[in-house]
Amino acid sequence: MGHNDNRTQMIDAVAPLDAWRCCRSVGSAVTGAVRPRRPDRRFLASLPDHGLPRGTTTVELTVLAQNAKSVPTAAIVEGIFAPRRIESAMMAFVVRHPKATFLVDPGICADVEGQVVAELPHILRLAVRPPKDIIDIRESLHRSAIDPETIDFALPTHLHWDHVAGLLDLPDLPLRLHRPEHDWAMAGPVAPVGGVRRAVRDRPLDRYDLDGPPVLTFARSHDLFGDGAVLLVDLSGHTPGSIGLLLRTERGPVLLPGDAVWHNLQVEELRQKSGYPGILADNDRTETWRTVHRLHAIRGAVRIIPSHDHRAACAWHDDLHAARSRQS
Ligand SMILES: [Zn+2]
């Protein structure tokens, strides 16, 4: 069976990763490692800071249990070789607001090999195959002592398989989605790889727009509960409708930026994702790069926990527990 037959079989579910894009990806990984993309200092200086929203209501943020895998830093952050390796994971979060409890980036389903990996193009499989000991979403909730029945809805930062596949194990859980992201993933000419459409389909859906004012360095926002405790902000680039969640917690403001960056080293050092697999993952590389600048500009004021940054997630978890044990 030829390559084309193979493609036809998968055409419903798989975005075409043509040879050109793959070559460009590997090529740009090599170039980027030697000569990383230079920060745009003028763009950075031009970013206004609109500040944080007002209000007093706070939310509680729980990082769900997940195992990490050690990966070469240069495969995540362009042109960074020290430390040599970093811990990467697929984090999911639970946010408790007085009015609702919701799941951010509902992670991985139990049958990840059959439901997801089988549908991934080979070139991507090499880079992103989940580790064998990955914890599926139901098990992850269980280990964090959270009853799935207490969750009101899921709110993904974007519609990539590693952020929504867990929905396959949470049937009927309502979903809130940024309208352009929903349109891109569900009605675009090609579906995102790895069962995304199946995960989203056939469940209650509420679509929102970023209809609110700028906040911090982000151009648009949506106030989820109308009290400034959870603001969804525009982080487009990685996908057309990627959002971040700006949370007001008792421990200060926290931003969950999804995959706008894969690791905080990118924010600190102002680096883009490495070319391979970054170029296969980022829908619009230039827009994503601008978003990294927006994150870099606020790094001192807001704690940022990227979805794949295991260190940042564990630090939040540990700080929270240290604070609790001091209280008791
Ligand atoms: Zn992603």
Image: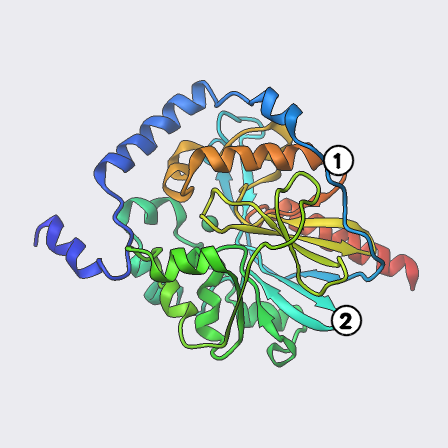
Q: Relative to 226, does residue 288 appear above or below in the rendering?
A: above
319 vs 35, nearest the viewer: 35
Image colouring: rainbow
Residue 18: image location, x then y, percent: 23, 42
The nearer-to-camera label among 2 and 1 is 2
Residue 84: image location, x then y, percent: 53, 30
Rendering quarter of residue 268? top right
Rendering quarter of residue 162? bottom left
Residue that carries the numbered disc 1 in the rendered image: 300
In the image, farthest residue toward the top: 35
76 vs 55, nearest the viewer: 55
Residue at 64 percent across and 47 percent down: it is 305
Q: Relative to 209, does residue 214 appear above or below in the rendering?
A: above
Element assignment for label 2: loop
Residue 180: image location, x then y, percent: 46, 55
Work out how far the residue at label 2 is from the one at label 1, CA to CA, in angstroms: 28 Å
Residue that carries the numbered disc 2 in the rendered image: 98
In the image, farthest residue toward the left: 1
Residue 323: image location, x then y, percent: 85, 55
On screen, residue 212 versus residue 2, left or right, reads: right
